[in-house]
């Protein structure tokens, strides 16, 4: 399995994370345990920062640029009636894959990312299972970002008053950032 993990790690570091074949088995990249442990610790202990999302993508967008803070994104400031989309900004300080952990809420909140009004394709998505000891996070979406580029994160439509968000850069964990899941 170590060879499979190395092949997946190389694919994720050198480009987008895609499935591959290792020893005849179809493999797909998954986030490594180290990433989950780190993200879950932050989800439980912070540091926390509150930001107000905007109901308008062209308006002022609260900055969520720090990778070591958990953001409590407040989405319902009485400006909308019924389910609405809410927007915040993100300008990464590093290139590459970024795991965007989404907090547990009563509903599964959709996340889309835009750059210059174009929707960015999601590289990967995983459900965070509670046995991982991560009760604060429910899902992680992985996107490839370019350092210094302004991105817009769009949540919803939703009635939820807030959602917790945490950004992590899996490549900083070296081999612990990515693992592989292969069909037998």
Image (tube, rainbow, N blue to C red):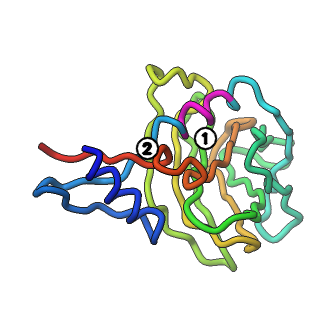
Which of the 4 quarters of the picture holds residue 89?
bottom right
Residue 160 percent across, percent down from the top left: 68, 36
- Is 127 situated left or right of 108 in this image? left
Q: Residue at x 61, y 29 (%)?
A: 40
| Residue 38 is covered by the magenta coloring | yes
- Percent x, y for residue 83? 66, 46
Magenta: main secondary structure equals: helix
Q: How far apart in space, not on screen, are marks 2 and 1 (Cα)?
A: 11 Å
Q: Quadrant of the C terminus?
A: top left
Q: Residue at x 65, y 51 (%)?
A: 155
In front of the other: 23 or 119: 23
On screen, residue 62 versus residue 84, left or right, reads right
Q: Nearer the viewer, residue 4 or 17?
A: 4
Q: Quadrant of residue 42?
A: top right
Q: Secondary structure at mark 1?
A: strand
* Position of residue 72 measured from the top left corner of the image (x, y, whole percent): 78, 38
The residue segment tinted magenta is 35-41
Q: Position of residue 97 (x, y in %)?
A: 55, 61
Task: Residue 126: give its label.
Answer: 2
Crowding around mark 2 (Cα neighbors within 10 Å: few <14, some 14 to 19, many 20+) is: some
Q: Viewer-proximal residue, 129 or 87?
A: 129
| Disc 1 target residue | 102
The number of callouts visible is 2
Q: Residue at x 57, y 22 (%)?
A: 135
Q: SS at mark 2?
A: strand
User: Up-down: is 121 above or below 80?
Assistant: below
């Amino acid at each position: 399995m170590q060879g499979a993990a190395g092949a997946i790690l190389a694919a994720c570091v050198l480009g987008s994370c895609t499935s591959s074949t290792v020893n005849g088995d179809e493999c797909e990249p998954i986030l490594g345990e180290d990433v989950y442990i780190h993200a879950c610790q932050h989800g439980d202990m912070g540091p926390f920062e509150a930001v107000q999302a905007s109901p308008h993508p062209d308006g002022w967008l609260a900055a969520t640029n720090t990778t070591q803070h958990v953001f409590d994104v407040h989405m319902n400031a009485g400006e909308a009636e019924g389910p609405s989309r809410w927007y915040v900004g993100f300008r990464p300080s590093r290139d590459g894959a970024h795991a965007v952990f989404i907090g547990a809420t009563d509903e599964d909140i959709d996340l889309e990312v835009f750059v210059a009004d174009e929707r960015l394709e999601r590289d990967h998505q995983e459900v965070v299972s509670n046995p991982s000891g991560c009760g604060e996070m429910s899902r992680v979406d992985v996107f490839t970002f370019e350092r210094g580029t302004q991105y817009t994160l769009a949540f919803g439509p939703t009635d939820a008053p807030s959602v917790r968000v945490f950004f992590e850069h899996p490549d900083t964990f070296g081999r612990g950032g990515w693992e592989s899941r292969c069909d037998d």
